[in-house]
Image (cartoon, rainbow, N blue to C red):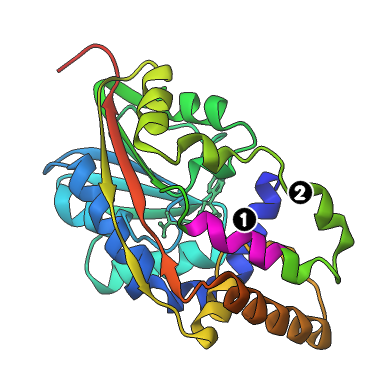
Amino acid sequence: MSAGGVGDVFSAAHDEFALWSARLWQPLGELLTAVSRPAPGERVLDACCGAGASAIPAARAVGASGVVHAVDLAERLVARGAREAEALGLAQARFETADVLTRDGGPYDVVQSAYGVFFFPDMDEGARTLVGRLRPGGRFAVSTWLADGMARIVPVGRDAALPERPELAGQAGRPNAAERVDTPEKLTAWLSSLGLRDVTVHQVRYVQPLHPDDAWTFYLGAAMRGFVEGLGPEALERVRRRFLDGLREAGIDTLDGSSLIGVGYRDGGR
Ligand SMILES: C[S@@+](CC[C@H](N)C(=O)[O-])C[C@H]1O[C@@H](n2cnc3c(N)ncnc32)[C@H](O)[C@@H]1O
């Protein structure tokens, strides 16, 4: 997806995305911050912040003397995050709609990104740009999906949309950036390839029951929405039915958000 495309999809998804905040994005966002460990007074960039799942805990951690720049392309997710930060009195959380790769800023003590880097047009180049926003010795922390979890549901979603969107056929089986960082070994190697030192990767098991109604809101609330954006209500209903049948056939009755959370230090400094 192009930068504009991914931002538009997630912005349109904001209502359904928010239905998953308490059950998925927020708990996992807290864990990213538990690994990146922003300290009082620090400057943090939360890249691809969505509705603030990891930016809000980071803002709590840095306190009033710090700052968190929370940046995402999806305007309506950013607006949700900004509203929540305001309601919580976290003025140090500054939400901004922008392409985090072309926005200047820094240097930061921490740059963190939950489930964002694999959307960059070039994941390596994008991550290097973000690492370049760190001060020497600053931490770069990312969350990615563990293999055989979230990735199992996406082909079912694509197949369900295929009869309405034949052009999706070309995407099946293509190399996918998320697969390059979906094991502890691959994520460790990738973070090291960015020139980071003292890389650590944590594995988190996070599996929850998935009612068919919730499976459909998940479809509409995240990247799979891109498969069906612009379809009319009848076509959408056909995709919904095929998707739920496909999940049953594949034996998928849970949402597996198992994750990897990695952190490394930019060279120099402390
Ligand atoms: C799966 S969502 C995760 C959102 C959030 N980090 C969370 O964990 O709840 C991925 C987000 O990446 C954002 N994104 C992708 N590429 C981006 C870019 N170049 N600049 C800013 N945001 C981007 C999308 O708009 C989307 O909101």
**Identity of the residue drawn at 47% across and 67% down:** 79
Percent across and percent down for residue 206 are 31, 62
Residue neighbourhood size for the residue with mark 1, other residues' Cα within 10 Å, grouped as few (<14), some (14–19), many (≥20)? many
Disc 2 + disc 1, Cβ < 8 Å? no
Above or below — where is 131 with respect to 257?
above
* Residue 159 seen by the camera: yes
Disc ID at residue 171: 2
Ligand 1 lies under 8 Å from the Cβ of mark 1: yes
Q: Where's residue 179, x and y in %?
A: 53, 40
Q: Locate residue 80, reporting x and y percent.
A: 43, 70
Q: Is residue 113 toward the left or the right of residue 221 in the image?
A: left
Front-lying residue, 208 or 126: 208
Query: In this view of the protein, can residue 63 be seen by the observer?
Result: no
Amino acid found under the numbered disc labelled 1? Gly
Q: Which residues are magenta?
A: 150-158
Q: Residue at 54% of width from left, 67% of height from top?
A: 76
**Residue pictured at 82% horizontal, 82% vertical:** 235
Left/right of residue 197 with respect to residue 259 in the rendered view = left
Q: Disc 2 or 1, which lies upstream in sequence?
A: 1
SS state under label 2: helix
Nearest the camera: 147 or 120? 147
Q: Is residue 119 left or right of residue 79?
A: right
Task: Assess disc 2: are there few (<14), some (14-19) or many (≥20) residues with their C-alpha within 10 Å of its C-alpha.
Answer: few
Q: Which mark is residue 7?
A: 1
Q: Is residue 246 above or below residue 264?
A: below
Q: Amino acid at mark 2?
A: Gln
* Front position among marks 2 and 1: 2
